[in-house]
Image: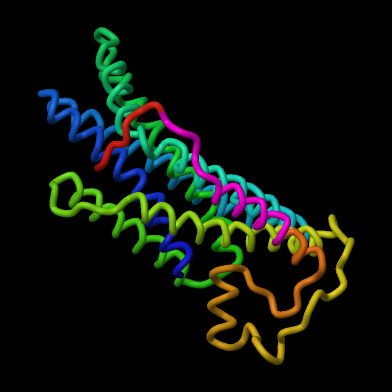
Amino acid sequence: MFVPFLIMLREGLEAALIVSLIASYLKRTQRGRWIGVMWIGVFLAAALCLGLGIFINETTGEFPQKEQEMFEGIVAVIAVFILTWMVFWMRKVSRNVKKQLEDAVDNALQKGNNHGWALILMVFFAVAREGLESVFFLLAAFQQDLGIWPPLGAMLGLATAVVLGFLIYWGGIRLNLGAFFKWTSLFILLVAAGLAAGAIRAFHEAGLWNHFQDVAFDFSTTLSTHTLFGTLLEGIFGYQETPSVSEVAVYFIYLIPALVLFSMPPRASTSPSRTV
C-alpha cells in the first residue's frame, strides 16, 4: 500500500504542479478565460491513462501461466526504465520547469484561431506523461502485491496530491519541493531495484531465464516474509527471503550505478532557479 501511495503522491504532485503553474500563469497574465480549456486537456489525459490501465489489467488476466509470468516480467522492466527516467528527468528540469511551462503556454496561445486546441494538446501531453508513467508502475506493483490495499494506497496518494496541488495554487502552503523530490527519488531507486530483481524472477518462472538460480542466501529463519517486517520489506522493496544469485546480482547491478549517478552533482543550468 505504501509504495503505490508514494508513487501516486509523487506523480500526482508533479501533474498537479504542472496544472497549478499553468493556471497561475494564465491568471497572472490576464488570460484566466483559458483555464477551462486547460481542464479539458487534464481530463482527456486522465481518461486515457485510466482507460489504458483498465484495458491492460483486464486483458492480461486471460493469459496462460507462462505468458502471464512473461508479461509481468516485461511490465516490471518497463516500470524500472520509467521510474529511473522519471527520477533523472525531474532532477534535470526541476530548476527551470516553471519557465518551460510558461513558454509552452505562450506558444500555444499564439497559434491563431487554433490556440484553444494547442493549449489542450500541450496540457494533455504534459499530464499524460505523468499518468502513463504511473500506469506501468502500478501494473507492476499490483502484480506483486494482490488485494485491495495497493489500489487503495494509489487512490489515497492521488487524492493527497490533488489536495496539495489546490493548496499550492491558492497559496495555502509552500513545500520544499527540492527536498521532497530528492528523498522520494532515492526511495524510488530502491523500489526500482526490487522490480528489476522481480523481473528476473518472473522471466525464470516463464522459462526464459534459467541461469544462476542457486539460492544466494536463506533468511527464512531470521527475516521471513511471513513476519510483519518481512511482509513490509517484500511489499515495498521486493525483498525475498531466499533469492537466487541472479536476482541479487540484478538488484545491485541496477542499484549501485543508479545511486552513483544520482549522487553526482547535476549539470549546471543556465536558467535561474525558481520556486513554486
Between 264 and 80, which is closer to the camera in this rendering? 264
Which residue lies most toward the top here?
112
Q: Which residues are magenta?
A: 251-269
**Residue pictured at 57% horizontal, 80% vertical:** 231
Q: Position of residue 276 (x, y in %)?
A: 24, 42
Q: Position of residue 241 (x, y in %)?
A: 70, 80
> Is 151 colored magenta in this rendering?
no
Total marks shown come to: 0
Is 5 displayed left or right of 160 in the figure?
Answer: right
- Is 135 drawn above or below residue 237 in the view shown? above
Depicted 159 relative to depicted 272: above or below? below
Q: Quadrant of residue 243?
A: bottom right
The colour scheme is rainbow
Q: Is residue 99 left or right of residue 218?
A: left
- Which is more toward the observer, 15 or 254? 254
Say which residue appears at 36% left-offset and 25% top-offset.
121
Of 266 and 258, nearer the camera is 266
Any part of residue 166 in sight: yes
Q: Pinpoint residue 72: horizontal percent, then vertical percent.
A: 67, 57
- Image coordinates for residue 40, horizontal then vertical, percent: 28, 33
